[in-house]
């Protein structure tokens, strides 16, 4: 079983265990605190896991708009990364492979790029999370002409060393099955 299969299996088991525990756990009365207990030291509140992932996506967007491949790749896990991208080849296995894809993509657009992320939805379950979004990209060619593309992105995140990283990604566009033509500017 490869690392992607292990991650997928672990996510399914984790989601099932959390769901079963939440459904089966009886509501317990809060335990009474002894009268002599000293108040607990207040732990500073940090950003929620969801807020951390939203910040990851915001940083990714800034890296994309700056055409900064190093910054873009800083949001992906170095180990066990698997990506289905919208352009060939069908899949990218590993961080180095996906970095080459980004280098090629941004290198083929010498002019500015405009990247916008919308409709981000994130669900966190312990140290694993998943999310989906709509991402709009406008690239500028050498001759100044622009191309637009709207993609659907589903990400799986994992908290590694206290930081959220993308461990799986699926980028796609709809295809009209009658004509077999892609819809690069897909609308709801």
Image (cartoon, helix red, strand yellow):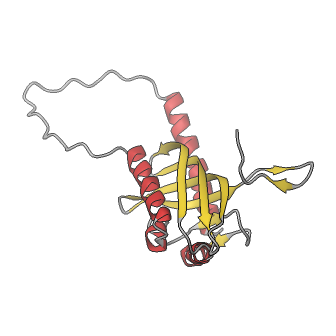
Tell which of 53 and 116 is nearer to you. 116
Q: Residue at x 19, y 43 (%)?
A: 43
- Give the side of residue 43 with respect to residue 35, left or right: right
**Nearest the camera: 39 or 156?**
156
The image position of residue 175, as x and y in percent, is 81, 52
Residue 40 in percent (x, y) is at: 14, 37
Q: Is residue 98 above or below residue 187?
A: below
Quadrant of image for the N terminus: bottom right
Residue positioned most to the front: 143
Q: Which quadrant: the C terminus?
A: top right
Query: Given the current orientation, which residue lies at the most extreme right position?
Result: 178
Does 158 sit left or right of 87 as displayed?
left
Residue, x 55% and y 75% (percent of image)? 99
Q: Is residue 112 above or below residue 115?
A: below
Horizontal side of 86 relative to 121 (left or right) equals right
Between 66 and 33, the one lying in front of the other is 66
């Amino acid at each position: 079983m490869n690392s992607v299969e292990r991650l997928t299996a672990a996510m399914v088991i984790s989601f099932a265990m959390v769901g079963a525990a939440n459904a089966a756990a009886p509501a317990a009365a809060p335990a009474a605190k002894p009268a002599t207990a000293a108040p607990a030291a207040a732990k500073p509140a940090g950003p929620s896991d969801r807020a951390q992932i939203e910040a990851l996506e915001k940083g990714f967007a800034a890296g994309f708009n700056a055409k900064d491949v190093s910054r873009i790749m800083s949001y992906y896990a170095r180990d066990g990364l698997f990506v289905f991208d919208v352009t060939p080849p069908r899949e990218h296995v590993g961080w180095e492979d996906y970095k080459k894809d980004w280098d090629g993509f941004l290198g083929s657009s010498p002019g500015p790029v405009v990247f916008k992320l919308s409709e981000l939805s994130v669900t966190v379950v312990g140290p694993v999370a998943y999310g989906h979004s709509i991402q709009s990209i406008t690239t500028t060619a050498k001759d100044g002409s622009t191309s637009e593309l709207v993609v659907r992105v589903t990400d799986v995140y994992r908290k590694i060393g206290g930081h959220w990283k993308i461990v799986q990604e699926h980028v796609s566009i709809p295809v009209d099955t009658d004509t077999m033509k892609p819809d690069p500017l897909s609308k709801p």
